[in-house]
Image (tube, rainbow, N blue to C red):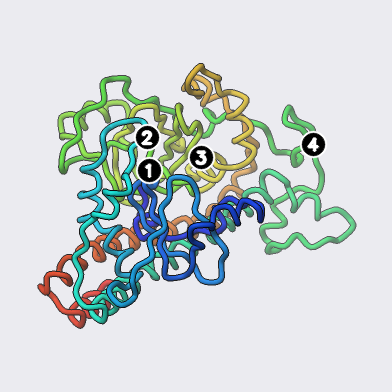
Amino acid sequence: MRSQDVRTGVFRPEQAAHVSDTTYQERIVRAEPRHSDLFFSREGTYFGIAAEVPWNTRVCLGQRMVLLRPDPAQMDCRFLRCWLNSPIMVSYMNGFRDGSVAERLNMPTIRALPVLAGPVSEQRAIADVLGTLEDKVALNRRMNETLDAIARAIYKSWFVDFDPVRARPASGQPTGMSAENAALFPARFGQSELGDIPAGWRVCKLAELAEITDCLHSKKPARIESGKTLLQLWNIRDDALLDMSDPYYISSSDYAEWTSRMEATTGDCVITNVGRVGAVAQIPTGFKAALGRNMTGIRCLDDCAYPTFLVQALTSSALRDEILLKTDSGTILDSLNVRNIPQLRLVRPPTPLLEAFERKCRPMRARMENNIQESSTLATLRDTLLPKLLSGEIRVKQAEKAMETAL
């Protein structure tokens, strides 16, 4: 997982697995996690990541995890989390990766991890400064989750469940929307190959709304320190945004080759063909990139330029069912053949409704994109401040001024 959210050591209780009381008691025999402890992942997806145990939450250690309990007389818990998740330590711990299937840190290595720290009072001051940045990143994350849920719910209500149509008959039920938008929906249903849909609407194929372009089927170009961006699977978030905290840069000549079919730009979508089949992301404003391997680009046609409708359609439950129908099961990995993507079916509403949806939901997507960019900037500032604070190059007061500018 290559995410700024993970790098901050955010504990997400809603994503945790639940265990029985018996299993819980078995797992806390040696130590029961408490606030001011840290979970530390020694292996797997979250290799080398530390997260604080939250307040008022009964939790136990999962597999491939270690509990760290700092001595409060010598080490502040929040500071230790910041230190372990810093680029300095990420680079250090990556030196222990051996390329095996199950890369791990053994207990002697974990116990011997270096910690650069001053007095506890100084640690707390540094943790307070960095914590302010992390709180803002967490707030942006929660805001994006809310905005994403709202946009998905509106799309589902309007274009999957057709709630405004169901609410319009003589029963007089409220539609839950403005009278202007409600008037754009018909009062009855008609039949289609996908079941009942609003009268006058039609089922169309994705190719009627968008241009679909396959990635270049060549050897993956070499990664370089800086250059042009080649999108990778790990850049695609579950909320259809891009996480560019770990960009894959290629040379200008490679970029020219890999954009010969399509250069992904503002409003375009990419969908994955292998691995996380059907994972979708939309290119944010002002960003350009080449399509990586096993990706397909989707760009609105000029006569249907509604990018927010496009991304919400591609991530909807209705299109997910279509994608499952057209996914080929392989011995090792399932795959979505690029020839099947143009054939994906969806319900197309009239143009006035597409325009109304775009007006309502595009500002939400724009805010989400801005929040991602801001969080990336704040995370970079956090990673820059920590070594400077530790070395004494800057003082806490100077760091606070830098934060005021960023915030």
Mark 1 neighbour density, 10 Å: few (under 14) some (14–19) many (20 or more): some
Task: Give the distance between the C-alpha atoms of the residues marked 1 and 4, in whole angstroms.
Answer: 54 Å
For label 4, the residue is 190
Instruction: Indicate the secondary structure of the residue bearing disc 1.
Output: loop
Task: Give the distance between the C-alpha atoms of the residues marked 3 and 4, in whole angstroms.
Answer: 23 Å
Q: Earlier in the sequence, mark 4 or mark 2?
A: 2
For label 2, the residue is 102
Q: Earlier in the sequence, mark 3 or mark 4?
A: 4
Q: Position of residue 111 (x, y in %)?
A: 28, 55
Residue 359 in view: no
Q: Nearer the viewer, residue 370 or 232?
A: 232
Q: Is residue 391 above or below residue 19?
A: below
Residue 95 in view: yes
Q: Nearer the viewer, residue 298 or 274?
A: 274
How many labels sit on residues? 4
Which of the two discs, 3 and 1, sits closer to the camera?
1
Q: Is residue 372 above or below residue 94?
A: below
Task: Give the distance between the C-alpha atoms of the residues marked 3 and 1, in whole angstroms.
Answer: 47 Å
For label 1, the residue is 43
